[in-house]
Amino acid sequence: MSSKEEIFQHLKSVLVDEFEVDPASIVLTAHLYQDLQLDSIDAIDLVVKVQDYTGKKVKPEDFKNARTIADIVDIVSQLLQA
């Protein structure tokens, strides 16, 4: 099972590699839309990456309320524990 730190590092690498986000801006408190400039298409792509990582289906309503990197880390952590 991955720790929240491992999940965070994985998310960070995905955001840098796939979405060309500046690594320095990726912190737990960063807002996906305001701080990282992700749009709704990016959010869908991120859900797919999370599903690939966890091997589990992500419910859109779970992800819809995610605002920060910490929210995504929590979602992934919960999926991995389920």
Image (spheres, helix red, strand yellow):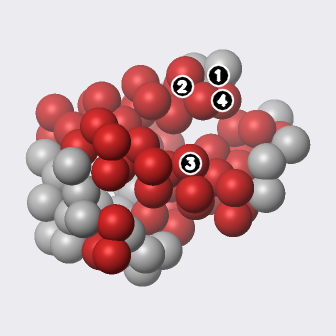
Which amino acid, mark 2?
Gln
Which amino acid, mark 4?
Thr
Query: Of callouts 2 and 1, which one flags the residue occurring earlier in the amino acid sequence?
Result: 2
Instruction: Left or right? Give the position of 12 relative to 5.
Output: left
Judged from the image, the secondary structure of the residue bearing numbered disc 4 is: helix
* Residue named by callout 2: 51
Image location of residue 52, percent across then percent down: 55, 22
The numbered dot on residue 54 is 4
Judged from the image, the secondary structure of the residue bearing numbered disc 2 is: helix
Judged from the image, the secondary structure of the residue bearing numbered disc 1 is: loop
Instruction: Left or right? Give the position of 27 relative to 3.
Output: left
Instruction: Left or right? Give the position of 80 relative to 47.
Output: right
Label 2 and label 1: CA atoms lie apart by: 5 Å
* Residue named by callout 1: 56
Callouts 3 and 1 close, C-beta under 8 Å: no
Label 1 and label 4: CA atoms lie apart by: 5 Å
Callouts 1 and 4 close, C-beta under 8 Å: yes
If the image is split into quadrants, where does the N terminus sit?
A: top right
Q: Give the quarter of the image for residue 82.
A: top right
Point out the frontmost of discs 2 and 3. 3
Residue drawn at x 64%, y 22% as measured from the top left: 56
Query: Of callouts 4 and 3, which one flags the residue occurring earlier in the amino acid sequence?
Result: 3
